[in-house]
Amino acid sequence: MSDAPRVIVAGGGIAGMTAALRLAERGCQVKLYEQKPMLGGDLASRTGHEGMMLDIYPHMYLSWYHNFWRLLADAGGRRDTGFRAMSDVTQLRRGRYPRFDTVTDLYSPRHMVQNLFSGVGRPADVFLYGYANIDMLAERLNPTIPLEKVSVEGFFRSRPYMTDRAAKAADSFITTVWAIPSYLAAANDYRTYLAYSLADHDPAYLLTKGSAHEQVIEPLRRTLEAHGVEIRTRAQVKRVHRQGRRVTTIEVEEVEEHQRRHRGKGTDNTWLDEVDELVLAVPPDVLLDLTQSADAGHRVIEVAPRLAEISRLRDQRIPVINLFFKQKLPGIPAEPVGLFESPLALAFTDISQAGRAADRDRPTILALSASNPYGLPGPDDEDDAQAMLEGLAEYIGFRAGHRWRSSPDIDWERTTYEANHDVKLFLNETGTDVWRPHAKCPGVDNLSFAGDFCANHIGMTTIESGVVGGLEAARVIVDRHGIEPPIVIETPDSGCSAVYLWLRYAWGPWAYAAKAWSTGSDCVRTVGRLLKPTPQRQRRES
């Protein structure tokens, strides 16, 4: 299409790649800049020992990610052969290894009774956790509290039927999945996620066979190049220059000089690109910097001052150890495992079981993450890594050693610790939805934004919200230039709110009965401990 614009996309994460592909498919001449040596953002993989690809973060892929699955299919990726369908959510308590507590198909009513007696908690508290989720979903039709102003824990704690153990169970699941404690997670975003998950839960989620690089990023990269997208890695957009209501040029800097290629006007390792359309698919802090980066009178922030509120948005690094054991650990499940009441909010996934043809005798490889990095002791990375290792050893009982690289049970030639300071995850904090930028930049006619932190109907930060963020940015450009066909964004099924409302009131008496059961059990146990003879009491009585 001859009148299609030239588009520059800054940022090679899933949002930037999505926008680039959908625009290139419609005849746009697209150039993609990424400052890192690899594409993918937090969905990328690093090259480990002997070329093994290790994901920066282990990800779950849910059935209702319809826009993601369509994107992957269009790129030649295969859901049926490249992913494993999973149904279980697993938890491990101290002193219980190798006995894992498993909830099967958490969002399906078919396994409700089975899950009550799964061992993840007392049946009464497990019921209350499930009922609290139904109660939150009922808020859509019958609001009792402004969800946009409270956290998930704030909502749960406000319910008179809630017990402390049920609230802790909710916090454990949320922290494991999103790396954000429930006292920070926005209840409104979480409700949307719950609705989508309950409406489309077959399977509950999927894991990649192998790395995300192989199954997701490489198919997308090949397809981008096949559509003529010029991809430049190790190239960072440093300045965005505005004239009136348009971005006119950007300044790009080569991150590593030996990667220098043909460039336009500029100094030795920087150059200028003229802009028809610009998509900024970068993290919130980088986006804010770029809107402020030009000389006075030419900054984006001057005509879009509300963008300064992006500084309210927060993200968080999640440290990961790719932990290679010398032997196979017995009983480790294939699904991700959360360590219950771990001070560091530790969780792990056995990536030695993630290959297409897993060797049953292969030594165990765990991707161990800490969703509470603030609890790490420092002062350097090895101290933090050792703290994570010792935390894991409290649950599965291997020899952690007294310092990093001293454990005799670990293959230290292959094991790596990634602090992930440069790959952070957006936090869906309470009250920040109003500050999330929309795809269309106000005051600038050829600038749009893409990312999982941008305002979209998905809400909770997920792979799907990243894809939708990219689609929203592409749609702004397509609509502005009248390009055909239009960008189609599918909204997941959110289920029947009337059913959730009916269940709120139908199960309400049972929720209060469950609380009475849970509280009564506590009282009985307390009295039993007080009446139980002790050696000291027996000596006094004799």
Image: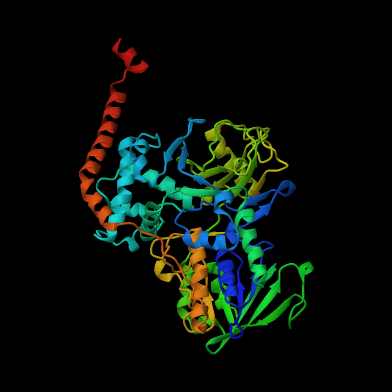
Q: Residue at x 29, y 24 (%)?
A: 528
Q: How many marks?
A: 0
In front of the other: 47 or 385 = 47
Q: Quadrant of the N terminus?
A: bottom right
Q: Is residue 10 above or below residue 362?
A: below
Occupied quadrant, residue 224: bottom right
Question: x, y percentage for residue 326?
Answer: 68, 34
Q: Is residue 26 above or below residue 166?
A: below
In this rendering, does residue 110 appear at all? yes
In front of the other: 88 or 421 = 88
Question: x, y percentage for residue 402?
Answer: 64, 36
Q: Is residue 98 left or right of residue 403?
A: left
In front of the other: 86 or 401 = 86
Q: Residue at x 56, y 31 (%)?
A: 397
Q: Quadrant of the C terminus?
A: top left
Query: Residue furthest toward the top?
Result: 542
Q: Residue at x 52, y 88 (%)?
A: 245
In front of the other: 299 or 237 = 237
In this rendering, does residue 426 appear at all? no
Question: x, y percentage for residue 299?
Answer: 56, 83
Q: Residue at x 52, y 30 (%)?
A: 98
Question: x, y percentage for residue 63?
Answer: 46, 53
State the colouring used for the structure image: rainbow
